[in-house]
Image (cartoon, grey):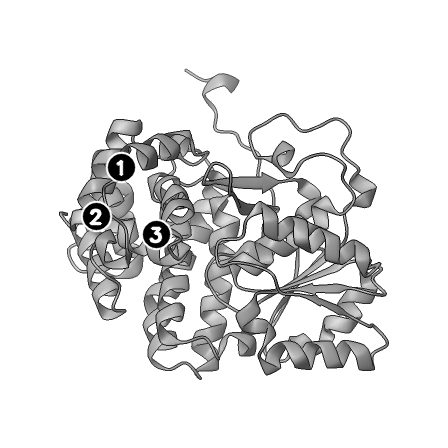
Amino acid sequence: MTGENILPRGNWPTPTSIRFGVGRIAELPEACRMLGMRRPLLVTDQGLASLAIVRDVLAANESAGLPTGLFSGVRSNPNGGNVGAGVAAFRAGTHDGVIAMGGGSALDAGKTIALMVGQSRSLWDFVWGRPVPMDVNVAGIAPVVTVPTTAGTGSEVESGAVITDESTETKEIIAHPKMQAGIVIGDPALTVGLPPHLTAATGMDALSHCLEAYCVPDYDPMADGMALEGMRLIAEWLPVATDEGGNLEARAQMLAAAMIGAAAFRKGLGAMHALSHPIGAIYDTHHGLTNAVLMPYVLSFNRPAIGAKMERLARFLGLPAPSFDTVLAWVIGLREQLAIPHGLAAIGVDERRSDEVARKAAADGNAPTNPVRIDAAGLRHIFERAVRGEL
C-alpha cells in the first residue's frame, strides 16, 4: 500500500555562510563590510573582553576603518537584562551591526541584541513556539557576524538563542529567521586558549546536540548523517583537544563538530536539554556540563525507543559488540576520561526544587521531541536520579 500520507517528508533548513580555518579572523573587517557594517558593536562576556583576543580584534577593525564599540555585560547564562543593556549600548553608540564573539552565551546575547535593536515589542514576544508578532520590524534587525571561541553550542550557525527570563527563572528560546548570522568566522586558533575543563564541557555539549538529534524520531536523514559524523569527530578529537589544548587539528575538528551538532538539531532535541534549561536557570550551572552529567540518565530512560539507533551508532563509532549498552559504556567512559562529575550534586544541584525543575522541563520546547513520551513525573524521575548519581 502506498500513498502520500505514509511517505516521509520534512522541512530542512541549512546553516549560514561559514568561513572556516586557522587565520580566518583576519577576514572579519571584510565580513563586516559585506554585511553593510560601518560601526559595529562587539558583544562578548567580561572574561573574554579582558583578553588580548578581543583587544586584537578591536585594533584590527580600527586599523581597517571600522571603529568598533564593545559591550561585555553578558552573564554565563545570559538574561533579559543583559539583552536590554546591550540594546541600549547599541543605540547609544549609533552602531549598525553586531559582532557576537565568544562562547554560546555571548553568541546568544549578541544575536538577540541584534534582533531587538529595531523592535518596540517585548523580548518575550519572540519566544519560540509562540505566534510570530505581525508587526516585527524586520528591516530594523541588525546584521550579525558570529565568531565562536569555544566548540560546543554551535550558536554561531543557529537562528535562535537561549535567554533567561529573570522574573520566572525560566530559560526561553528566542527565535527569528533573521537572527541567523550573515557570516560565521570559524577560526580554530581562537579556541586554543580554552582551559581543559571548559574544552571538555563545551565538547560534551556538542555531543549532546548530535546524540539527542540523532535520537529524535522525525524523518531527516541529512540531519541524522550530520549527527553521526559529529559524534565520530567528537569521539576521536575531544579527548585530544582537552589534553593537548594547542593541537590545532583537534581544535578544528571540534569546532566543526559543534557546528555540525547545531545543524543536526534542527530535528529537535529531548529530555537532556528540557532538563538542563531549568537547571541552568535555577542553579546557574554551565549548560554543557549540565548536559554532560545528564546524558547517561536520559539515555537510560529512552532505552526502549533507541536500541536500534544505538546499535547503528556503535557500529559507526567502531565500538565492540555494538548495542545500547556499548554506547552507554562509551559515554560513561568518555565522561570519566574528561573528569565530568557523575551526578548533579557535584555541580551544586539539589532536590529541593525537584517539582519546579520537572514542571519547567515538561513545558520546555525540547520535551515533545524526546524519543520516549515524557511528562513532569518522568522528568522528575530522571532529575532526582541524576542528582543522586543513581544510574
Q: Is residue 197 left or right of residue 185?
A: left
Q: Hey, what amino acid is under mark 3?
A: Asn
Residue 369 sits above or below residue 146 on the image: above
Q: Secondary structure at mark 2?
A: helix
Q: CA distance from mark 2 to mark 1?
A: 10 Å
Q: Is residue 270 left or right of residue 336?
A: right
Specify which label sits upstream in the sequence, 3 or 1: 3
Q: CA distance from mark 3 to mark 1?
A: 17 Å
| Residue 239 place in picture, x, y as percent | 32, 72
| Residue 159 place in picture, x, y as percent | 62, 46
Specify which label sits upstream in the sequence, 2 or 1: 1
Q: Secondary structure at mark 1?
A: helix
Query: Can you tell which mark lies on residue 387?
Result: 2
The residue that mark 3 highlights is: 291
**Camera-side residue of 287 and 86:** 86
Q: Is residue 74 left or right of residue 299?
A: right
Q: Secondary structure at mark 3?
A: helix
Residue 300 sits above or below residue 113 on the image: above
Residue 310 visible, this angle: yes
Q: Quadrant of the N terminus?
A: top left
Q: Give the crowd class for mark 2: few <14, some 14-19, many >=20 residues within 10 Å.
A: many
Tell me how many marks there are.
Answer: 3
**Camera-side residue of 65 and 10:** 65
Q: Decide: marks 2, 1 in contact (CB < 8 A)?
A: yes
Query: Can you tell which mark lies on residue 354?
Result: 1
Q: Residue at x 43, y 34 (%)?
A: 364
Q: Residue at x 77, y 76 (%)?
A: 61
The quarter of the picture where residue 22 lies is bottom right
